[in-house]
Amino acid sequence: MRLVRRYLAPVVDACHRPTLEGVEHLPPAGPFLLVANHSAGLGVAEIMAILVLYLRHVGEARPLAAFTHPIGYRVFPLSLALRHLGAVPSTYAAAAAALSAGVPLLVFPGGDHETLRPIWQHDRVDFGGRVGFLRIAREAGVPVVPLGIRGGHLTAPILFRSRALATLLVAPRLIGQKRWGVSLLGLLVGAAILAAGPASWWLRGALVGLFLGSPLSFLPWIPWTLRLRIGPPLAPAELFPAREGTDDELRRALVRVQAAVQSLVDR
């Protein structure tokens, strides 16, 4: 956390000038799910902004855990960094452990489906029909706090996404990705390799495919402003009033939560 404050915060402030509103809506005590929309491939700018702003406005006295892809815990030194930053694998067991310990949990339900959506859909909150996070909230009996993020899409513009692309480039499938996208950075670097790369065309093509299939093509490179807004919490009694325990109940709750996040993004 000292490293974040000393080195990361100045970079995030300079590049993205992030602002956070609605901190007063965070429950004063107890665990909750902080549910946000997601953009720009890896969403690095958004995640770093949340980390910096949470420390600045809430502080270390109330830790916040965050769901991350389980594969990160098998890669050193990333695994070490994730644990020290308070991240947990995106599994039901890890969620239950964090919430039962009284630790709030940050979740991006849309995952790769939402973060890889093309830039012209940037203002559309789309969780892809995923209701796992609501199953976690229902089982733990914790409120869902919506978080809307605007501006992240322009830090690493995505041009299109495809399931076939993940298979074609091979590398995404090896790290467990079902879909992949092409970013503006990937297109520009790919064009540069084709224009000025090694003389052999097959080698140029291999390098382009390697870069397009690498997470490096999703790194933020445009210093765009990020706006974050937290909305009022949605209590379990609001999301699951009938206590049906069914998938239909989860789908109705999804519509409610997604609309709450959408309203924050629109504002």
Image (cartoon, rainbow, N blue to C red):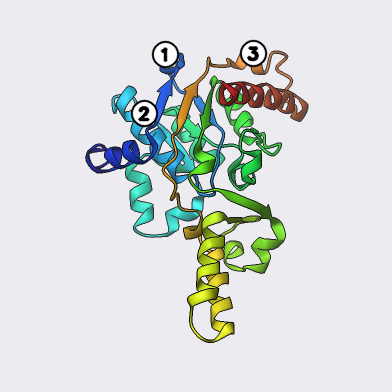
Q: Position of residue 195 (x, y in %)?
A: 53, 75
The residue located at (37%, 35%) in the rendering is 51
* Residue corresponding to mark 1: 24
Q: Position of residue 105 (x, y in %)?
A: 47, 31
Counting residues from the N terminus, which is met first, the one under dot 2 or under dot 3?
2
Q: Amino acid at mark 1?
A: Glu
Q: CA distance from mark 2 to mark 3?
A: 26 Å
Q: Nearer the viewer, residue 254 or 133?
A: 254
Is 69 rendered above or below residue 63? below
Q: Amino acid at mark 2?
A: Tyr
- Dividing the picture into quadrants, the one containing residue 111 is top right
Count of numbered labels shown in the rendering: 3
Q: Nearer the viewer, residue 229 or 14?
A: 14
Kindly state the secondary structure of the residue where label 1 is placed. helix
Left or right of residue 228, residue 194 in this image: right
Question: What is the quadrant of the N terminus in the image?
Answer: top left
Residue 102 appears in view: no
- Dividing the picture into quadrants, the one containing residue 115 is top right
Q: Position of residue 106 (x, y in %)?
A: 48, 33
The residue located at (30%, 27%) in the rendering is 56
Q: Amino acid at mark 3?
A: Glu
- Dividing the picture into quadrants, the one containing residue 153 is top right
* Residue corresponding to mark 3: 238
Q: Residues within 10 Å of mark 3 (few under 14, many from 20)?
A: few
The residue located at (63%, 13%) in the rendering is 237
Q: Position of residue 185 (x, y in %)?
A: 51, 57
Q: Residue furthest front?
A: 195
Q: CA distance from mark 2 to mark 1?
A: 12 Å
Counting residues from the N terminus, which is met first, the one under dot 3 or under dot 1?
1
Left or right of residue 149, residue 61 in this image: left
